[in-house]
Image (spheres, rainbow, N blue to C red):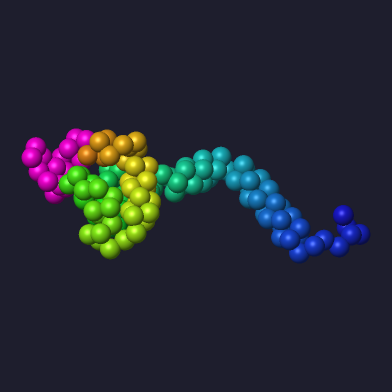
């Protein structure tokens, strides 16, 4: 490869591969540092998963969640908070994913199960 000019992107990729290889080789000489580095990276990925699932909802998702638990329809929520129905539906999909719920009934059940609403309550506390 020494006699052939590399394109800029190829140079960047090659540099990154060399840096990664050197980093791995360096860390391999210090097993505890390698373990700590891997653990830190794994924790970075799960940091967003700390806490109760409903605590990971964005402020807008929390608002939609509160209204869903009050048994409002998507169109009612859209009108109340001045969003398109498709946007409310997108927030609903985010809520379902974060709560690991497949239906509105599961979302409402979750709210009751974790004590966000009590019997006869219209919505989360």
Which corner quadrant of the image does residue 7 belong to?
A: bottom right
Residue 25: percent from left, percent from top: 66, 45
Residue 19: percent from left, percent from top: 67, 54
Q: Most extreme residue toward the right, as rendered?
A: 3
Q: Most extreme residue toward the left, as rendered?
A: 120
Report if residue 98 is visible in the image: no
In-front residue for pair 116/25: 116
Residue 123 within the segment the image draws in magenta: yes
Eyeballing the image, is 13 above or below 8?
A: above
Residue 107: percent from left, percent from top: 26, 39
Type of secondary structure dominating the magenta stretch? loop
Q: Residue at x 31, y 61 (%)?
A: 83
Q: Residue at x 76, y 58 (%)?
A: 10
Report if residue 67 is visible in the image: yes
Horizontal arrangement in the rendering, residue 5 relative to residue 93 (left or right): right
Q: Residue at x 9, y 37 (%)?
A: 119
The N terminus: image quadrant = bottom right
Picture mark count: 0
Q: Residue at x 36, y 56 (%)?
A: 87
Eyeballing the image, is 30 above or below 16?
A: above
Which corner quadrant of the image does residue 118 belong to?
A: top left
Which corner quadrant of the image does residue 86 belong to?
A: bottom left
Horizontal arrangement in the rendering, residue 56 relative to residue 46 (left or right): left
The residue segment tinted magenta is 109-125
In-front residue for pair 124/86: 86
Residue 27: percent from left, percent from top: 60, 46
């Amino acid at each position: 490869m020494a006699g052939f000019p590399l394109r800029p992107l190829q140079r960047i990729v090659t540099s990154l591969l060399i840096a990664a290889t050197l980093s791995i080789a360096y860390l391999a000489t210090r097993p505890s540092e390698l373990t700590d580095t891997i653990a830190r990276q794994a924790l970075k990925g799960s940091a967003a998963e700390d806490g109760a699932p409903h605590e990971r909802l964005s402020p807008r998702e929390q608002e939609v969640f509160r209204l869903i638990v009050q048994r409002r329809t998507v169109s009612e929520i859209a009108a109340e908070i001045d969003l398109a129905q498709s946007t409310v539906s997108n927030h609903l999909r985010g809520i379902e994913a974060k709560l690991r719920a497949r239906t509105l009934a599961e979302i409402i059940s979750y709210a009751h199960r974790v004590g966000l609403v009590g019997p006869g309550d219209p919505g989360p506390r």
